[in-house]
Image (tube, helix red, strand yellow):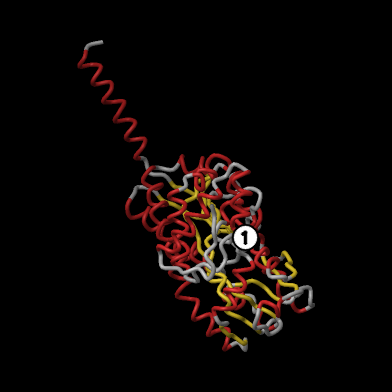
Amino acid sequence: MKHWLKAAVAAVALAGASTTAAQAEDIKLRIASGHPVVNTYVNLMNTFFVPEVSKRVAARTQHKVEFIEGYGGAMVKVADTLEGVQSGIIDIGGYCFCFEPSNLPLHAFQVMLPFGSMSSVTSVKQARAVYDKVPFLSKVFEDKYGQVLIALISDNGYNLNTTFEWNTVADLKGRKIAGAGLNLKWLEYAGVVPVQSSLPEAYTSMQTGVYNGWIMFPSGVVNFKLNEVAKYYTEIGFGAITWHGLTINKSRFQRLPKDVQDIILEVAKEFEAMTGTVNDANYPKQIEQLKSMGAIVKQLPPSVAQDWATSLKAWPQEKATELDKANMPGTQVLKLALDEAEKLGHKWPVRYEVK
């Protein structure tokens, strides 16, 4: 075949490929969370991520994205979201890594360093810095669970909601307090009896005396009206924790047009930052709301946090060693997390040592 004919055939083939690539697609994506839409990050999925992706795809590409949304367990339960994204039952899922202690043990690293910053903005920046420096944290989603981590999600600052008043760590000894996953260790080291629970059970459980308190951020108390059965909200300052994420099924993501992929990643980055800014803006409002709802809110002096942190002083090293033995970069991650928090201006009540 002559050179000019070869070139013509190649040009036609390239044009055909370009036309195919540029063909408009109507894309349907199922997005879900086991948590309800009153939860801050789920609300942002519903009110920011979904409409912004749809709007930007319509404005900047030939494609159209339609989301099918399912929150509050409508499509997946809180403990099944990772598997839901992995299997393709849903395309995009928002969930807490706390429900995946065997699959994602290292991703709760901020919980292993209690009394971190109470700023959600600082928390998510700290976490992002660590994720960017330790590729393992993101790659495990792709390599083992068939999904791409597109955003980190920060919670609000954790404190203690109880049915009784307390002022020192000693006042809590022997009391039954609930938590979720790894933060139960905060209680255990302080001599508290830890109880694994979930928010939908909290009201009835405290009302009937199954336990007498919760490690909880203020929005959880407001949204589930826990102040009606546990009127004391004590600002001890365990820290804002970034241990949720937004992931998309890897196979589905790879099949999307490149311009749509780029917009999803762009909006996800903004969504990640907003989980910090919105939580920080809401925290003082929710504290005032709790007071208006009849809760007794008080701040404890820094010495109480220091006492509690002292009881936990050896725990970060224990967790780092345990994770290292499981072939995960536990020491590297915890050391980085400590350093990054300080770079962002946080002063630890007790400076944990991880070697």
x%, y% of residue 178? 70, 69
In the rendered structure, the answer to whether residue 133 lies left or right of residue 210 reads left
Position of 197 relative to 331 (above/below):
below
Instruction: For mark 1, give the secondary structure.
Output: loop
Residue at 65% across / 78% down in the picture? 161
User: Foreground: 328 or 139?
Assistant: 328
Q: In which quarter of the image is residue 109?
A: bottom right
In-front residue for pair 42/280: 280
The residue under the point 45% across, 63% down is 341
Q: Position of residue 22 (x, y in %)?
A: 34, 40
Q: In this view, does 300 lie above or below 252?
A: below
Q: Give the crowd class for mark 1: few <14, some 14-19, many >=20 residues within 10 Å.
A: few
Q: Which of 219 and 54 is in front in this view?
A: 219
Residue 176 quadrant:
bottom right
In the image, residue 190 lies at what x, y percent?
Answer: 68, 70
Amino acid under disc 1: Ala
Q: Can residue 205 be seen in this view?
A: no
Disc 1: which residue: 314
Residue positioned most to the top: 1
